[in-house]
Image: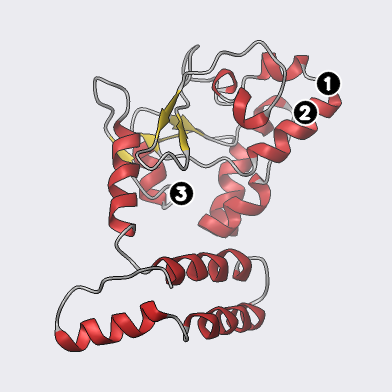
Amino acid sequence: MLRALPRVLRLQRPWTSLGTRDCASHTGREIQVRSLAGPDQGADLKEREQMSAVEVGVFVQRLRGLMSEIASSAVMGLIETTRGLLPGAGGTQRLPRCLGVALAKELIFTGRRLNGVQAHELGLVNHAVAQNEEGDAAYHRALALAQEILPQAPIAVRLGKVAIDLGMEVDIAAGMAIEGMCYAQNIPTQDRLEGMVAFREKRLPKFVGK
């Protein structure tokens, strides 16, 4: 996995990128991450051991922002306790928020590995897809999801993301206040008015991002 991340993590290590795929709009790039050396290389400890303290800090910091859909053949787990460690890239904080405290403790304390189907059943990932011959099944599922989001009002989607992300970092009362502020910003938009008119006229709205 680490060999696929040099451009993301900006670390000077002898890893080779698996390549990127240009998006149609040329506004972003897809990074394909695959294990190159067996089923147990999600965090390659041999290469990790060669990093300096500074490189480890940078790696862990940027790994926190790396999210990806997985194919059903993938295996994941917070296995640090089986190596004398504890999760240090946010696992002890994010997993309880995803699955609840009891199940997060079970998975972290045991170092249990889950395949994509099991992770999906627990709600740990949104989607698990069977891998195809080209090895890009997750990419196509992500693209389909993006195409489902694309027609929606962009300002509302953006403010919804802000409300969710910030609200998860605070208590429910503060989260409701954040939502209220985001909602207030959306009220004067042209897209909100277009949505109301389209609903009344029983047609699809034409959002313009204003």
Q: Is the Cβ of the residue at disc 2 closer than 8 Å to that at disc 3?
A: no
Q: Residue at x 29, y 86 (%)?
A: 196
Q: Position of residue 17 (x, y in %)?
A: 53, 18
Mark 1 or 3, closer to the camera: 1
SS at mark 3? loop
Q: Is residue 52 left or right of residue 70?
A: right
Type of residue at label 1? Ser
Q: Is residue 166 left or right of residue 12?
A: left
C-alpha gap between disc 2 and disc 1: 6 Å
Type of residue at label 3? Leu
Mark 2 or 3, closer to the camera: 2
Q: Is the Cβ of the residue at disc 2 closer than 8 Å to that at disc 1?
A: yes
**Is residue 24 placed above or below 176 in the rendered structure?**
above
Which residue in the structure is indicated by mark 1? 52
Which residue in the structure is indicated by mark 2? 56
**Is residue 143 placed above or below 39 in the rendered structure?**
below
Q: Residue at x 41, y 68 (%)?
A: 209
Q: Answer with the quarter of the image where residue 23 lies.
A: top left
Q: Position of residue 94 (x, y in %)?
A: 61, 52
On the question of residue 87 being in view, the answer is no
Location of the C terminus by quadrant is: bottom left
Sequence-wise first label, 2 or 3: 2
Which residue in the structure is indicated by mark 3? 124
State the residue lying farthest toward the right.
53
Location of the N terminus by quadrant is: top right
Type of residue at label 2? Val
Task: Count neighbours of disc 3 (C-alpha within 10 A) and say few if under 14, some if 14 to 19, many if 20 or more.
Answer: some
The number of numbered discs placed on residues in the rendered structure image is 3
SS at mark 2? helix
Q: Nearer the viewer, residue 110 or 68?
A: 68
Q: Position of residue 25 (x, y in %)?
A: 38, 43
